[in-house]
Image (cartoon, grey):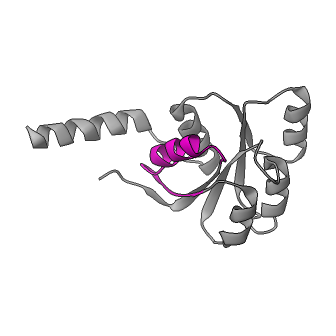
């Protein structure tokens, strides 16, 4: 089993189900992950915690956009880190997101290692072995056990 970072929690808010599932499956290899499809359910269900939290928020969603959601989450999670993801980044959105205090902006499409690297950076983790290498190593062990 892969070692997870139990003291860190990743909250994904992405309205595209396939993208949400892909991010969840990738990040849960190392972190506790909770997913939501919109801002409303995030605010209704998510409870403040003492864990270190990184929010991975899509900008363009039904209801509140990612910037508005962040503004509502900060009082509940004042120590959290926030990453905004979007396929719509232009100069205005970039300026608005920076003014809103996002810790990172990641344009879509992106590779999963990009997300992992940014999350680890925001959490102050110095991982010597990349997540891709861990998955390859674990897959090799499982294959050897089957054979």
> In the image, which residues are magenta?
14-35
In the rendered picture of this protein, how many numbered marks are placed on residues? 0
Magenta stretch holds residue 18: yes
Magenta stretch holds residue 140: no
Please state which of residues 16 and 9 is positioned toward the viewer in this rendering: 16
Q: Is residue 20 left or right of residue 64?
A: left
Please state which of residues 43 and 47 is positioned toward the viewer in this rendering: 43
Q: Position of residue 48 (x, y in %)?
A: 68, 72
Please state which of residues 55 and 15 is positioned toward the viewer in this rendering: 15
Q: Residue drawn at (80%, 29%), measured in percent from left and top?
A: 89
Q: Is residue 129 above or below residue 81?
A: above
Q: Is residue 67 above or below residue 107?
A: below
Q: Position of residue 52 (x, y in %)?
A: 61, 61
Q: Position of residue 32 (x, y in %)?
A: 49, 59
Q: Residue drawn at (47%, 41%), measured in percent from left and top?
A: 127
Q: Position of residue 131 (x, y in %)?
A: 43, 38
Q: Is residue 87 above or below residue 76?
A: above
Q: Check the picture and name the quadrant holding the C terminus.
A: top left
Q: Residue furthest left?
A: 147
Asked if residue 55 shows in the view, the reply is yes
Asked if residue 120 shows in the view, the reply is no
Q: Is residue 6 left or right of residue 122?
A: left
Please state which of residues 134 and 58 is positioned toward the viewer in this rendering: 58
Q: Is residue 128 left or right of residue 57?
A: left
Q: Residue drawn at (64%, 72%), measured in percent from left and top?
A: 49
Q: Is residue 23 left or right of residue 62?
A: left
Q: Residue drawn at (34%, 38%), measured in percent from left and top?
A: 135
Q: Quadrant of residue 111?
A: top right
């Amino acid at each position: 089993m892969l070692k997870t970072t139990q003291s860190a929690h990743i909250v994904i808010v992405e309205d595209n189900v396939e993208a949400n599932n892909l991010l969840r499956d990738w990040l849960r290899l190392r972190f506790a992950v909770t997913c939501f499809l919109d801002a409303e359910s995030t605010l209704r269900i998510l409870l403040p915690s003492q864990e270190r939290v990184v929010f991975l928020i899509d900008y363009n969603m039904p209801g509140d956009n990612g910037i508005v959601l962040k503004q509502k989450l900060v009082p509940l999670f004042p120590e959290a880190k926030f990453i905004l993801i979007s396929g719509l980044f232009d100069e205005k959105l970039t300026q608005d997101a920076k003014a809103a205090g996002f810790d990172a902006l990641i344009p879509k499409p992106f590779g999963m290692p990009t997300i992992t690297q940014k999350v680890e950076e925001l959490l102050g983790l110095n991982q010597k072995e990349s997540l891709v290498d861990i998955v390859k190593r674990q897959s090799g062990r499982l294959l050897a056990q089957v054979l």
